[in-house]
Image (tube, rainbow, N blue to C red):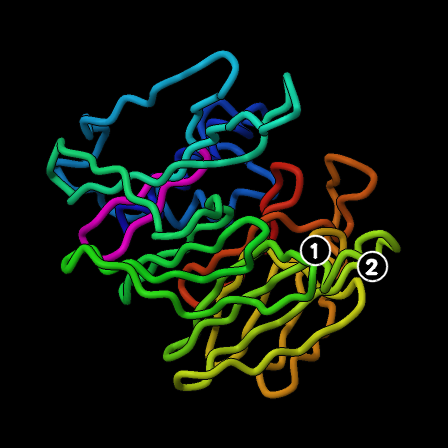
Amino acid sequence: MKFYLSLFFAFAVIACSTHSEDPCKGPMIPLELLVSEACEEELSEDFGWQPAGFSPVIDNERGGSLRKVTHSKDWLIIRDNWMSPVKGKPNYRTFSPRVFISKIGSSVWDTIAPPTDAYVKNVFADSSGLYVGTYRSGEIWKYSPEEKNWKRLLKKEVGAGGWFDVMGIGRTSNRLVVNLAGYKDSIEEAAKRITTVIAIQKDSNWNQYEEEDGLQFLSAVEISGTFFVSAYDLGVCKLDLNSGNYQQLAKFPPPYRQTDSTRYAYKIFTHKEKLYAISHNVIYQ
């Protein structure tokens, strides 16, 4: 895990290094807390970039750039930015990312997809496996890299013409927490009444908390039993897993990259039991 955090720090420094030529010597706002910790750690002799044997297929009309890299134990997982044509709509494309997996140290990559007609929307991985959320069908699938099999954990039930996207996936020590957003049926869609759902795994069942145009989160982490989510313009929120209720945390301090950056949160992560949030390419602690 230290290796991946170090890589993340490297990406952050490259993106925001206009404040200082040497992040270990000069001030980096607001990255200096992260960078100083990374610079203090002694790097192993094999630290650095190594070829992983993966070259994305790029297409001018369908994309192919890489959007996410994660891992489950000793398996690397990549999600790209592939687009697919829409039947009956010339020159129209829809988001249909592909998922690739390889064992760390191997140059062999497999393309994997859950056994459903729905496109992949979201990918989450930890030591328990890989989890995939779908586009429009509201499904959650678990993939076990060692056994190479899929298991469907959740499918959101809807009325005629209804659909749900899986917006975010997180996990506590023993259960998944999933965020869905969409329409219960065609009538709700015509009225533009979005329903958001916080689905919390409980054994083989799910507790589902619905709200009209409520919380939508992109990422989630747990620190000492408290569950936090990054929720777009709601910022970082604390989510009560027993009720589905949430509480906004404080606004971000200056400096701001954009006027709406006081709350807007794309991504959150933890390091040494501290919470960090990314907002418009600025990292806050």
Magenta region includes residue 112: no
Report the residue at 78% width, 50% height from top: 262
Q: Amino acid at mark 2?
A: Ile
Picture coordinates of residue 171 (x, y %)? 44, 69
249 up-or-down from 146: above or below: below
Closest to the observer, 190 or 260? 190
Instruction: Give the Cα separation between the discs numbered 2 and 1.
Output: 8 Å
Picture coordinates of residue 263 (x, y %)? 75, 53
Q: Is residue 189 left or right of residue 239?
A: right
Report the residue at 28% width, 59% height from top: 150
Quadrant location of residue 126? Answer: bottom left
Q: Is residue 127 left or right of residue 59?
A: left
Q: Is residue 276 visible?
A: no
Q: Amino acid at mark 1?
A: Gly
* Residue interval drawn in magenta: 67-78
185 up-or-down from 41: above or below: below
Picture coordinates of residue 169 (x, y %)? 50, 61
Magenta region includes residue 71: yes
10 Å neighbourhood of mark 2: few (<14), some, or many (≥20)? some
State the residue position of label 1: 161
State the residue position of label 2: 187
Q: Is residue 110 left or right of residue 282?
A: left
Report the residue at 40% width, 83% height from top: 204
Marks 2 and 1, the one that precedes in the sequence: 1
105 up-or-down from 73: above or below: above
Residues tagged 2 and 1 counted as in contact (Cβ below 8 A)? yes
Main secondary structure of the magenta stretch: strand
Dot 1: element: loop
Closest to the observer, 98 or 130? 98
10 Å neighbourhood of mark 1: few (<14), some, or many (≥20)? few
Residue 152 is labelled as none
